[in-house]
Image (cartoon, rainbow, N blue to C red):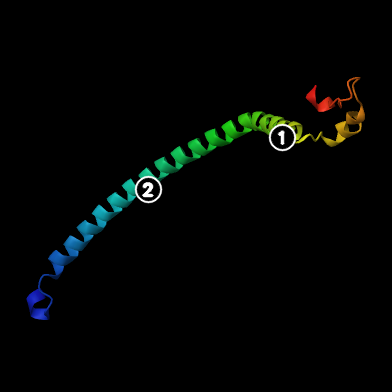
Amino acid sequence: MEEAHGVEGYVETQAGLEKISEQKATVDEGKKGMLDEISQTVAGITAKIKERQAELAPRIQARKDAKQRLVDLETGECPPPLREASSHWDCGGTPVIPCLA
C-alpha cells in the first residue's frame, strides 16, 4: 500500500524516528539529573566559601588595621585621635608618639 501511494518505507522511518525520540528523551533526563547534581555541588561550594569569608572577615579587617598602623608609624603619622596627644615630648627632646604604645 505504501508503494502504491509513493511513500515506500514510511512505517519503518516513522518507527525509527520514534525510537530515536525515546532515546533522546532518556539522554535528556540523564543530562537533567547531571545538571541538577552539578548545581547542588556548586551551591554547596558557594555556601562554604561565603561561610569561610564571614569567618575570616574580622581577621582580615584586623590585619588591614594593623597594616595601616604600621604604615602610619613608618611615615611618622598617627591616626587622627592620637595626633593631639603626639605633641607631648619626652625629657630627651624627642617626641613621644602615642601610636607606638
Distance from the alpha carbon under mark 2 to that under mark 1: 54 Å
Q: Nearer the viewer, residue 35 or 13?
A: 35
30 to the left or right of 52: left
Residue 100 image offset from top left, x and y in percent: 79, 24
Q: Residues within 10 Å of mark 2 (few under 14, many from 20)?
A: few
Mark 2 and 1 residues: CB-CB less than 8 Å, in contact? no
81 to the left or right of 43: right
Q: Residues within 10 Å of mark 1 (few under 14, many from 20)?
A: few
Q: Say if 83 sits above or below 6 in the image.
A: above
* Element type where label 2 sits in the image: helix
Which residue is at a point 88% across and 20% down the rendered structure image?
92
Q: Amino acid at mark 1?
A: Val
Residue projecting furthest to the top:
91
Q: Quadrant of the N terminus?
A: bottom left
Residue 44 image offset from top left, x and y in percent: 49, 36
Residue 8 image offset from top left, x and y in percent: 10, 73
Q: Quadrant of the C terminus?
A: top right
Tell me, yes or no, if residue 1 can be seen here.
no
Which numbered marker is on residue 29?
none
Residue projecting furthest to the bottom:
5
Tell me, yes or no, if residue 88 can be seen here.
yes
Specify the quadrant of the image occupied by residue 24. Answer: bottom left
Which residue is at a point 22% across and 60% down the rendered structure image?
18
Residue 9 image offset from top left, x and y in percent: 11, 70
Which numbered marker is on residue 32?
2
**Residue beneath label 1, please?**
71
Q: Say if 4 sits above or below 43 in the image.
A: below
48 to the left or right of 31: right
Specify the quadrant of the image occupied by residue 94. Answer: top right
Q: Nearer the viewer, residue 17 or 65?
A: 65
* Element type where label 1 sits in the image: helix
> Nearer the N terminus, badge 2 or badge 1?
2
